[in-house]
Structures are given as structure tokens and as C-alpha cells.
Amino acid sequence: MRFQLLICGVLALLTPFATPLAGAASAAEYTRDEIGGIVKDYIMEHPEVLRDALTALAKKEKDAETAATAKLTTDMTGDLYASTHQAVVGNPKGKTVLVEFFDYNCGYCKKSIDDISALMKQNPDLKVILKDFPVLGQGSIEASKVATAVRNQLKGDAFWEYHKALLLKRNPSGVGKADAMEIAKAKGVDMDKLAKDMTNEDNAKGIFEVMKMGDRLGLTGTPSFVVGGEVVVGAVGFDALHEKITNTATCGKSIC
């Protein structure tokens, strides 16, 4: 597709020269081989056309990607902020929002849990949206399925306690379904309902939604955050996130 677009661009550049070269009434009268020969000759004489066309195409694609990301991160009614497939902790009515994409087997996510707790404590108007982004293997996917179903029973602070317990669970082979189920039972979850909810179509739909969203945002790992319209990749620490949250509360953007 990229090469076809490039050829179309080159043909557009050659259109003014086409008729004089062959004496035809219009470019439509050229055969495929004749057009190919014209393009080849022109590119051989002016190879910079390829470079310029590719540069222009790359810029166009980058601009489109930037615009799409900006729309996704600023639309407060969209799936990033208002999906039914997400956990909300902190102040559910908070005007300042921090979104975290995490994986239950992510070591840096485990280290960031204290930062998130401190941020919610120091910012009572902070709404935290947790997006389960299981990118670290089958165990993460299994834990995600359980946690997604647990959200049907545990909300707010109750889910936050479950989330912390599972995220901080130590398992040398990685956290998986058994760990997530064990903690759910300890938290008083109805296990029969949990088993049923895990097989619900809505469960898989929620996980797929987050995976697709992560792809649209270009996320390459966890934890990743969205705050004030900015995508922040990595465990950047309390101070960096606190500054962005404060700025967002002040001027609506992560950088004022």
C-alpha cells in the first residue's frame, strides 16, 4: 500500500510531461508498460522524488496518528475515560483523572502501587481509572479474566484492596488464575458468580477493548499512564505524576 501511494504521487508529478512524451491526447491512452517506463526513467533521473515522497508520506501518517491520539486522550466521553469495562478507584466523581494501564505480572507496576496510593491520598479530587493490559503472557491474561469478573462484585475501595493484593502477590512463576481466585475468595467474593462472570462474553470484550486502546495509544509496556491529555510511559515515580496531576487540576493539561 505504501509503495502504491508512492507511485500515485510520482504519476501525479509526471502528468504534465506525459502527453508531450508520447504525443497522446491524454494519459489514459498510455499502456501499463509505457507508464511504467516513464516512471522508471523519471525516477532514475530524479531519485530524490522517492525520498521526498516517502518523507511526505511519513509526515502525513505521523500527523494522523498524533491527531487520533489527541482525540482519544481528550474525549472525556470516550472509552478511555467512560467505558463500562474499567475499574474506578479514588474519587469516582473527581474532576482530575489519572488512567493507568497495568499488568499483574509487571514488576514496575508493583513498584508503582505505593505511588498511586499516595497520589490518591494527597489529591482527594483524583479519579483513578485502572485499565488491565495483560501483555506479559498467559498468566497475565488469566489473572485479568478473574480480576475483570471480580469488578462485578467489588467496587471502589473494595476493588482497590483486591487489586493491590493481586498486584503485590509473590509467585516465582508469575501470577495467574489460581492466585487471582485465591485472593478473590479471601475478599469474600461469591465464587459461583465469579466463575459464571469469567465466561461471560462481556468479560472478553472488556479485555479486548483495553488491548485495542493500548495499541491505538502506541503503548509498548506497563505501567503507562494518561493524565492531562498526555501519555506517560513507564514507572516515572510519584513526583513526576504528582506534578502532572497538579497541572491538570490547574489548567486542564499535564504541562501548563
Image (spheres, rainbow, N blue to C red):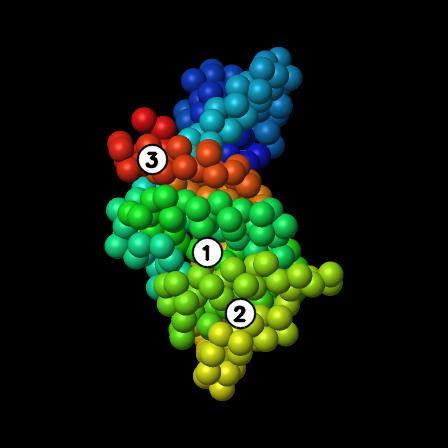
Residue identified by numbered label 2: 145
Residue drawn 38% across the image and 49% down it: 120
Q: In this view, does 188 lie to the left or right of 110?
A: left
Q: In this view, does 119 lie to the left or right of 43?
A: left
Quarter of the figure that contains the C terminus: top left
Mark 3 to mark 1: distance in Å?
A: 22 Å
Q: Which numbered dot is residue 246? A: 3
Residue drawn 62% across the image and 57% down it: 105
Q: What element carries label 2?
A: helix
Mark 2 to mark 3: distance in Å?
A: 34 Å
Between residue 73 and residue 144, name the one nearer to us.
Answer: 144
Residue identified by numbered label 1: 131
Q: In this view, does 86 lie to the left or right of 35?
A: left
Between residue 39 and residue 110, name the one nearer to us.
Answer: 110
Quarter of the figure that contains the N terminus: top right
Image quadrant where residue 182 sits: bottom right
Q: Position of residue 211 (x, y in %)?
A: 51, 56
Query: Which residue is the extreme one toward the top?
Result: 45
The residue type indicated by label 1 comes to Lys
Q: What element carries label 3?
A: helix
Among numbered discs 2 and 3, the one appearing first in the sequence: 2
Given this view, does label 2 or label 3 mark the residue nearer the observer?
Answer: 3
Residue drawn 46% across the image and 72% down it: 150
Q: Position of residue 12 (x, y in %)?
A: 45, 25
Image quadrant where residue 141 sits: bottom right
The residue type indicated by label 2 comes to Lys
